[in-house]
Image (spheres, rainbow, N blue to C red):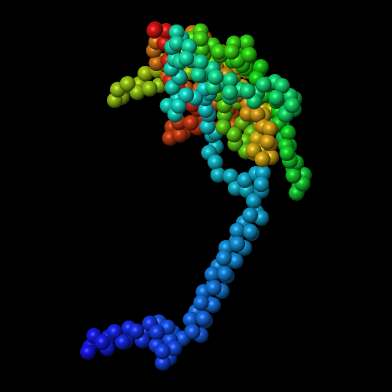
Amino acid sequence: MAKDGEKGEWKDFIWNPRTREFLGRTASSWGLIILFYVVFYIFLAGLFALTMYVMLQTLDDHKPTWQDRLSTPGMVIRPKADETFEIVYNIQNTESWDLYAQALDKFLSPYNNSIQAQKNDECTPDQYFVQEDSGDVKNNPKRSCQFNRTILEDCSGIGDRYYGYQDGKPCIIIKLNRVIGMKPGSSGDAPYVTCGAKPYKVGKDEWREDSEKIGQLMYFPPNGTFNLMYYPYYGKKAQVNYSQPLVAVKFLNITTNQDVNVECKINSNSIPEGSERDKFAGRVSFKLRINTNN
């Protein structure tokens, strides 16, 4: 009998025909609760939409409103075979170095003189190409300066389609990461790239470097400079045809059949030296090995 009574109580709780209550509430009570939550969530959705709308009004489609970045931009090299930054090939094995030549061809194709002449302007060297907005009137799209492939001379792939790899005199292309608004040189001094031996650890407290293995280097453009006319950069949307300046380094007589650890870094009177915690800040390191044995 007790079980029948409990069963009846559960039935009455779910649906009580006498009071016409469902789960302890009448239809009007449920209606008010549902109406409250509908209005409540509509209010929350509206508040969220209003907040997003107000925030979007503060954003510029062409330039970040707030810019939190490292003071020292990163550097990268091409060709880049993999994430290990190792360039290893055998002079006698064409397939081992032809992939590097093809990668450089693909990378440099947007820098062909004909393409640059169509898209970009001839600018005045050794000075910033400043294009300020006029108050609320945006000066967009902004123009960009030509960086012709021929500037890289022996490393342009025009006179030597294999970029020196077949002769054991390979070219490495270096670029500085884009940073909106950065002016990388002051007092008219352009930033420039230098490459040398990278110290590496061989024991607990012993370091070694490959200075004697690197040999003679040639830089293109001369002195490995990033001309000031390519700065400041205004962003991908504002400067759609921007061509990043490049520096090429040609290794003329590097030691063969041995690993050579190389580090290239940016030198500028307005860019701080990179931190050891970030190996790509203002520098890039890679291993170069040219084999001559079959």
At a point 59% along the width and 34% down the height, the residue shown is 178
With 106 as the anchor, is 135 left or right in this view?
A: right
Q: How many marks?
A: 0
With 187 as the anchor, is 277 left or right in this view?
A: left
| Residue 134, placed above or below residue 105 | below
Q: Which residue lies furthest to the left in this view?
A: 1
Indicate the quadrant where residue 19 lies: bottom left
| Residue 57, placed above or below residue 117 | below
Residue 107 x, y percent position in the rendering: 58, 24
* Closest to the observer, 132 or 271: 132
Indicate the quadrant where residue 244 lies: top right
At a point 38% along the width and 22% down the height, the residue shown is 200
Q: Is residue 217 visible?
A: no
Q: Is residue 41 visible?
A: yes
Residue 128 x, y percent position in the rendering: 70, 30
* Closest to the observer, 97 or 71: 97
In which quadrant of the rendered image does the N terminus lie? Answer: bottom left
Residue 195 x, y percent position in the rendering: 51, 19
In which quadrant of the rendered image does the C terminus lie? Answer: top left
| Residue 187, placed above or below residue 256 | below
* Closest to the observer, 12 or 142: 12
With 21 as the anchor, is 273 left or right in this view?
A: right
Q: Which residue lies furthest to the bottom in this view?
A: 18
At a point 45% along the width and 34% down the height, the residue shown is 278
Indicate the quadrant where residue 189 lies: top right
Residue 140 x, y percent position in the rendering: 73, 41
With 161 as the anchor, is 5 left or right in this view?
A: left
At a point 40% along the width and 84% down the height, the residue shown is 15
